[in-house]
Image: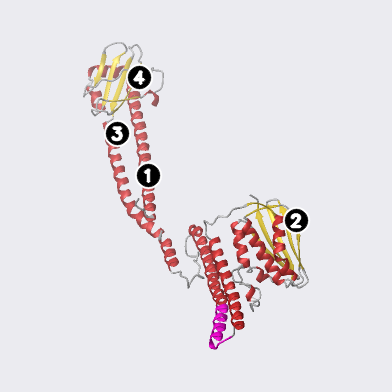
Amino acid sequence: MKRISLTFRLALLLVTFSFVAFTVMGSTLYYALYKQLSIRDDAALISRVDQIRTLLQDLDARQLVREKPHLFGNMLGNTESQLIIRYVGGSTLLEVNPVRRNIPSVTPIAADQSLTLDAVHHTKSTEGIPVVYMAAISVSANEQPLEILSARVLYERTDILREYRNEILFFVALMSVISVVLAFFFARRGMSPLQTLAERTAKISTTTLSSRLDKNDVPIELDTLIDPINAMLERLEHGFQQLKQVSADMAHDLRTPITSLLGQTEVGLNAPRDNTYYQKLLGSNFEELQRMSRMIDNMLFLAQAEHPNHAIQRIQLDIVQEMQRIQEYFEDLASDQGITIRIHGDGAVFADPLLLRRALANLLSNAVRYAYPNSQIQIIAESVSHGMNIRVINHGETITTPHQERVFDRFYRVDPSRHNVTSSNGLGLSIVNSIMQLHQGKRWVESDEGVTCFGLFFPKE
């Protein structure tokens, strides 16, 4: 389908509105004129009949009608008017009917009744011209009552209304044409803020993501568009900065083992060595390659977890069994530092088994790594109304508030010196964050006075 521009739509709406407005206005004026002319013609007919009825109450006037009927014909003065004066139930005294049209029969108004607009009747001639007519009784002393029957064919009113209608149609057509031109002009002017907004948006690139669209010089109706665009730019800027940081951190973390591999290998190739040396060299290289492999696996997992079509299989799991499984796995590593692991709570959690175990393992590994020697780590599960809270608590250095907001970022380490990088690649908590997003859950961290708590919330099914 052909796309229709917004300018054309606005112009079409303005033209349609103008056409309808002018049409309604013209129709209203035409109808008002029609009503006024109709009342005027009805009143004129009533006035004529009333004058004739009053005149015929005089005996001399009746005598004059008998002797000189042409005077009444001249009094009417046009071919539109018709007049018949006749005795009630008797002969015709006067008939003025130049075009010989029949006047419909009608019940006359009694002599003692006043003439009102309700006494006028309306019909149409054979040519479709409106006709008004009425009848009244005139009474004089010692004379037989007379019936006055008068009608008028409204040629003049028809011509006036036709001419007025033609002028209204011409006016509506003319104003419609003018409205088309003005509508397109004003529509283009009205759309200019959008064009300005589009030009500003087009100038934004990866080097100017910090810029924002200004709302001060555009209509307030565009705020609903500008606010989401600025919010999107803020997210893009944050994501781009995070991506740059991830790239830098990943390059740093990969460069360290690669530099170590190259250096050790170069030293080993400079001169013949015994088998013991080569075994140690291969063992060291193997550890570095394992670390690189884990980093690549973690990055692949994060990339897959962010894919919108990534699906997980959530089932009901006994949280006690899962905590015991993780406790047993890390028990030897913790005992080397004199750390004990305690579990508390019970209930069921609705989660993907493998992802739940990986999240708990990452949190417990992090807790063991940074806990004080000879301290205690607690894994607490607590059922709440909407799901399950799981907390991993250890005693160690306090994580300050600025660091708490970023510990779930990729490659982020609280210790800027990056100590102990051989055992950590900075992706463990990022993986926890992605796992909780897949479960539509929450993750948080609290740290105060040497006690650090990492929490997970798994919603119910």
> What whole-number distance in Å separates the C-alpha atoms at marks 2 and 3?
98 Å
Q: Residue 136 carries which label?
A: 4
Residue 389, magenta (yes or no): no
- Residue numbers of the magenta segment: 255-273
Residue at mark 2: 345
* SS of the residue under disc 1: helix
Return the disc, 4 or 1, that comes first in the chain's sequence. 1
> What whole-number distance in Å separates the C-alpha atoms at marks 3 and 4?
24 Å
Return the disc, 2 or 4, that comes first in the chain's sequence. 4
Residue at mark 1: 20
* SS of the residue under disc 4: strand
> What whole-number distance in Å separates the C-alpha atoms at marks 3 and 1?
27 Å
Tell me if residue 51 comes above or below residue 193 in the rendering.
Answer: above
* SS of the residue under disc 3: helix
Q: Are marks 3 and 4 in contact (CB under 8 Å)?
A: no
What secondary structure do most residues of the magenta stretch adopt?
Answer: helix
Based on the displayed image, in which of its 4 quarters is residue 24 positioned?
top left
Closer to the camera: disc 2 or disc 3? 2
Q: Which of 225 and 173 is in front in this view?
A: 225
Give the residue drawn at x 69%, y 65%.
364
Amino acid type at image mark 3: Arg
